[in-house]
Amino acid sequence: MKNPILTLIAAAGLGLGLGWGLAAQETKPDTSKKEWKGQEEYSLFQAYQKADVKGRIEALDKWKAAFPASEFAEEREEQYLFVYQQTNMNRQAFDKAAEILKTRPNHFYSLSAIERLVYTLPPPPKSDDLDTAERVSKYLLDNLDAVFGASNKPADVKDADWDTYKPAMKNAAQATLAWVYVQRKDHPKAEIELSTYLRLDPTQASTSLSLGRELLAQNQDHPEKLPLGLYQFARAATYDGPNSLSAVARKQATCRTPQALIERTDVDTLQRAREKRLTRTAPAPRLPDDTAVR
């Protein structure tokens, strides 16, 4: 079965994959502030511009080898990032984005690349890649206003579009942070971050399904979380609005709820959890304080 977290990031970060990382495909350096180191460097830049997509990496390599200290080094690194993404070299693109962020932490295209590309790397995810995704996502969530300050807006992004990217990036960062903890099997942290994401976007049924799994995974040490976990399974199974599971997946969510756990749960609690009007609209159950597991 497809990882539901992958589904939710695809929904949350749709814009990331449809242009945010590939918009600036041509470099037009501001020569009023920077200068070429002679005709040779400018000729290498022109060769890069004239090259086809497959030849652009080689052209960038030649330019970088000849002029490593170019005044246009930052723009050149951006072009590596764009070309890697254009040619589906996801490993190289992810690493280049991480490299750029070491010196330019608010670089929009690198931040969005990390949020999108971490899901495309070969499984199982490497510990270092999860660390990078966690660090970048936390930075985004803690510094959204700074990241989306006017001075950080790429020249090719319209002002009206810039305003819409901020909430989408927030959702993407929150989804990625939750995904990282799911991958690490850190169930308590995954529960917290999935719950936070579900509050941001209650329509994400796949998030309810993932949250249910994380809650049930803690059942042995925290039996009080069992009703909440079953509620999320019920919610995923009954919700049929925007971003709902397919009909087949909703049926599977119902059938795969562990029967042994159901039998241990207060009947009234399960009845409330399965009540359609509640599960369709509430990301968390409205349970009484005395809800108990036998």
Image: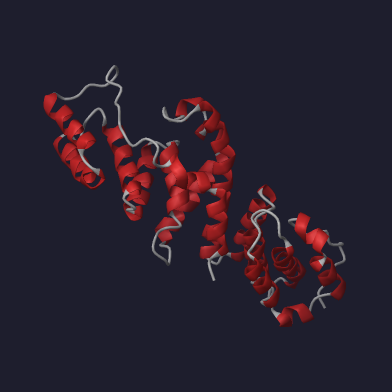
Q: How is the image coloured?
A: secondary structure
The picture quadrant where one finds residue 213 is bottom right
Q: Is residue 135 left or right of residue 217?
A: left
Q: Is residue 177 among what the camera can see?
A: no
In the image, is residue 187 above or below residue 259?
Answer: above
The picture quadrant where one finds residue 4 is bottom right
Residue 253 in picture, x, y percent from top left: 67, 71
- The residue furthest front is 247
* Number of callouts: 0
Q: Is residue 175 left or right of residue 56?
A: right
- The residue furthest top is 32
**Residue nearest the viewer, comparing 57 with 138:** 57
Q: Is residue 242 left or right of residue 13?
A: right
In the image, is residue 103 above or below residue 287?
Answer: above
Residue 146 in picture, x, y percent from top left: 52, 32
- The residue furthest left is 40
Q: Is residue 252 among what the camera can see?
A: yes
Q: Is residue 187 left or right of residue 74?
A: right
- Which quarter of the rendering shows the N terminus? bottom right
x 26%, y 33%: residue: 73
In the image, is residue 213 above or below residue 98?
Answer: below
- Which quarter of the rendering shows the C terminus? bottom right
x 52%, y 48%: residue: 14
x 65%, y 63%: residue: 211
**Residue nearest the viewer, comparing 94 with 69:** 94
Residue 67 in picture, x, y percent from top left: 17, 34
In the image, is residue 213 above or below residue 151?
Answer: below
